[in-house]
Amino acid sequence: MHFSGRTWRPPYEAHSVIIQATSGCTYNKCKFCNLYKNECFRMSPIEEFEEDLAKIKRYQPNARRIFWTGANPFAMSYENLKLRALTVRDYLIKCQTMAMFASIRDIKGKDVRQLRKLRAMGINGLSIGVESGDDETLALADKGYTSKDVLEQCRKLDEAGIDYMTGLAGKGKGERNARNSAKLFNRLNPYFISVDSLTLFLDTELYRMAQHGLFVPALEKERIRELQTLINNLNIRTHLLGNTISNFTPVTAFLPYDREKVTSRLQFVLDNTDEKEMQKYRSNLKSLG
Ligand code: SF4
């Protein structure tokens, strides 16, 4: 298989077949992120993609879901995505669904008709690293778009998953971040909301800002309260997946049904765990993969 550079897939894709479609990130500027810092964006040539599909066909001919790796394979043009989606279909005849990361910028260049067509071809598992619905937090993280852009672009999609990050707004601002994000997410229709918690890695801009007192990270307990606020303010039916290693307390919930259960569980952790123990957990995290 032609894996080059960093290969990363979210935990909820653990049962999917993995193929490299791109490597690196087209943007690479988010202040908290070091995932693809030392890589240039590269699109896997179609010949390479096809060779990998031939291998997958040999070992997993009945694969039903395939995850395309790279920070944002959806940056490819409509025609390129179409070609690849149809090629997947040629090799894996039982494949029903294709998933990948996408950024708000990647959706901008595609119209609703194209997005619907891609979905009909099987690209129906987009996961979008929105991170926040709060404009101040988006600007602080240098995500390169506003909540208005998120609303406009996500509304063009029939269904997608979005990512949220607790702690990203900084100390004392988690409540505002959660409320504004819930307000925005309530206007979208995310199939799931995946939650991570900010971990400051050495080679990120946000880490450097923290060193110079320009960013004060939220305490661990504030992040848990932020997550409770988010959950309490979401009034849509959605899956909440807060079970990556960046979360001190892994939680998953189907909202609104599990709201009470999951916020009580988080409250139990708040009441019975020492802040220092939580901070120790985070300082031991060397990567998110
Ligand atoms: S968070 Fe995503 S879009 Fe931002 S730099 Fe990292 S990989 Fe790229």
Image: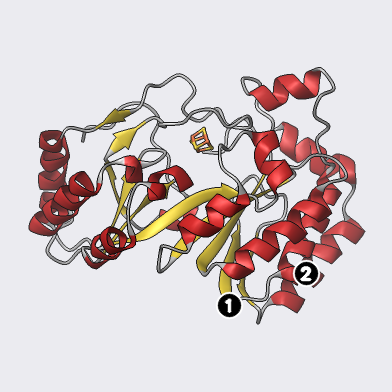
Compared across the picture, whether 20 is left or right of 254 comes to left
Label 1 is placed on what type of residue? Answer: Arg
- Would residue 168 be seen by someone viewing this image from the given angle? no
Q: Is residue 40 above or below residue 276?
A: above
Secondary-structure class at tag 2:
helix
Q: What is the CA distance from the residue labelled 1 to the residue labelled 2?
A: 16 Å
Where does the image place residue 283, in percent across and percent down from the top left?
Answer: 74, 32
Q: Residue at x 70, y 50 (%)?
A: 134
Compared across the picture, whether 238 is left or right of 234 comes to left
Residue 263 got which mark? 2
Q: Residue at x 24, y 49 (%)?
A: 78
Label 2 is placed on what type of residue? Answer: Thr
* Of callouts 1 and 2, the N-terminal one: 1
Along the viewing direction, whichever of 265 and 157 lies nearer the viewer? 157
Q: How many marks?
A: 2
Q: Residue at x 72, y 19 (%)?
A: 208
Where does the image place residue 95, in percent across and percent down from the top left?
Answer: 20, 63
User: How did the renderer colour the structure?
Assistant: secondary structure
Which residue is labeled 1 in the image?
Answer: 237
The quadrant in which residue 226 appears is bottom right
**Which residue is outermost to the bottom?**
257
- Would residue 129 be seen by someone viewing this image from the given angle? yes
Residue 271 got which mark? none
Q: Residue at x 52, y 65 (%)?
A: 192
